[in-house]
Image (cartoon, helix red, strand yellow):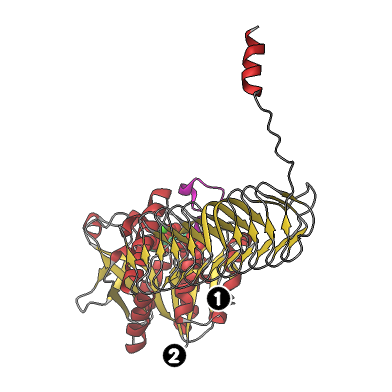
Amino acid sequence: MINVSVVILAAGFGTRMKSNTAKVLHRAGGLTLVEHVARTALAVAPPERVVAVVGHQSEAVASALRPYGVKTALQAVPQGTGQALLCAKDSAPAEGLLVVLYGDVPFLARETVERLIAQQAAGDAAATVLTAVLDDPAAYGRIVRGPEGDVLGIVEFKAASLEQRAIREINSGIYCFRAGLLWQHIGEITTNNPAGEYYLTDMVEILRSHGHRVEGQVMADPRELLGINTRVELAAIDSLFRERKANQLMLDGATLERPETIVADVDVRIGPDSIIESGVRLLGSTVIGANCRIGAGSVLTNCRIGDGVAIAPYTVIDDSSVGDNAKLGPFSRLRMNSVVEANAHIGNFVELKKTTMHSGAKANHLAYLGDSSIGEKTNIGAGTITCNYDGAAKHPTQIGSGVFVGSNSTLVAPVTLEDGSYVAAASIVTETVPAGALAIGRGRQVNKPGWVAKRKKDSAS
Ligand code: UD1
Ligand code: CA
């Protein structure tokens, strides 16, 4: 096995994004562009052999990469792709194979990189260039091949003759080099070109001038090399990621209704026979079990959903978990580490914040339950509100199992309702309700006979 290392060039400005955020930190498919590239790199090399060259907003880009454990090298002033790669020299391995990736080319599949490495590893060339054949080769660098098929050179569009511009095979900018030869000769790149930059593409002719061969590998799906320069291209790449993800989820056994309307981030997983209705957004690290139904328009961010869960439309869940066979929605809201255990029911316009509904508990309509624990099989009536905030601090509400809370009750925290207790409808509860007790916390009703007729008479006179 030959050691593989990867250098990611990510120091460019990205002026055409018209953004205060560095280009490679914009998101597509749920990740920043540079994270996609880092993940591809880590599919072929361990983190200590991956170096990202950062420059523009170097601190922010480096911190987006920190969780991946890759190294970074600084290119203080961008002077071209050749000089950017040179900046990685001291951090990257001196031997083995070295792959160059671009931070703004996020859709490249790991299989494509693996195929490039395999061709380079199998032959005697000094480098292999990943190329594509395009109907419209636009302003990409052109690949000039010799009679044997070897790559003789890469001509940048600006410097290309009319005949060269007619070549439809283009440079993806992705290469696999023999690291030893690359580092030995990279210093020979000059700025002798119309842009006055250090062009990495010059390495082809430099290696050939020392008697080495350079090969090309044509990629199967040229969409993978789409680079991002504008937000229009960002949206196009995002759509590609969504499509690739939706297809993968369907092949793994989920049913997606009108998949083109479903947004699933790259790390989302769904068990078999779950049905995702149209317009659902599944974000972050959300994992859904088997045999679930997720209703139209629901948005789930960083959620764990068990098996057999039914979520009716327009339910919004953040950073929370739902147990097997629970029923939620329509229009439920869960957030901040709420837990809905197995067989519990959360109905329309019920909000849970940092609250656990133990198994079989129900809150079917119009409630706010915050900083609470709701015991097994407890029933929370319509309109129940936990008053968890006193203007300065949050307080807990403890509700035992088998409790019945009558509709429109106000539970002023901190407060405890012990097992099997009852709360009369429309009560204001400020003190512990002992086990098995009924709490009635409201004014008594007074009926005034004949009052209506009397008022009518008074107002007429
Ligand atoms: C480059 C290639 C071109 C190829 C095209 C494919 C060269 C000279 N040309 O052109 O043949 O068809 O990519 O997309 O290499 N970067 C740095 N520091 C720099 C310059 C660039 O980190 O000083 C990074 C950029 O952030 C970007 C990548 O390198 O991620 C490519 O740079 P860019 O200027 O976009 O190269 P192109 O002109 O597109
Ligand atoms: Ca580019």
Q: Is residue 19 magenta?
A: yes
The residue that mark 1 highlights is: 89
- The N terminus sits in image quarter: bottom left
Q: Nearer the viewer, residue 456 or 395?
A: 456
> Is residue 78 visible in this depiction of the protein?
no
Image coordinates of residue 271 in percent, x first then y, are 40, 74
The residue that mark 2 highlights is: 2
- Say whether mark 2 is within 8 Å of ligand 1: no
Please tell me whether residue 175 is drawn above or below residue 231 in the rendered image: below
Q: Mark 1 belongs to which amino acid?
A: Lys
Over which residues does the magenta segment extend?
A: 13-24
- Distance CA(mark 2)–CA(mark 1): 19 Å
- The C terminus sits in image quarter: top right
Question: How many other residues sit within 10 Å of disc 1, few (<14), some (14-19) or many (≥20)?
Answer: some
Which numbered disc, 2 or 1, marks the residue closer to the eye?
2
* Picture quadrant where residue 92 is located: bottom right
- Residue beneath the point at 36% across and 57% down: 239
Marks 2 and 1, the one that precedes in the sequence: 2
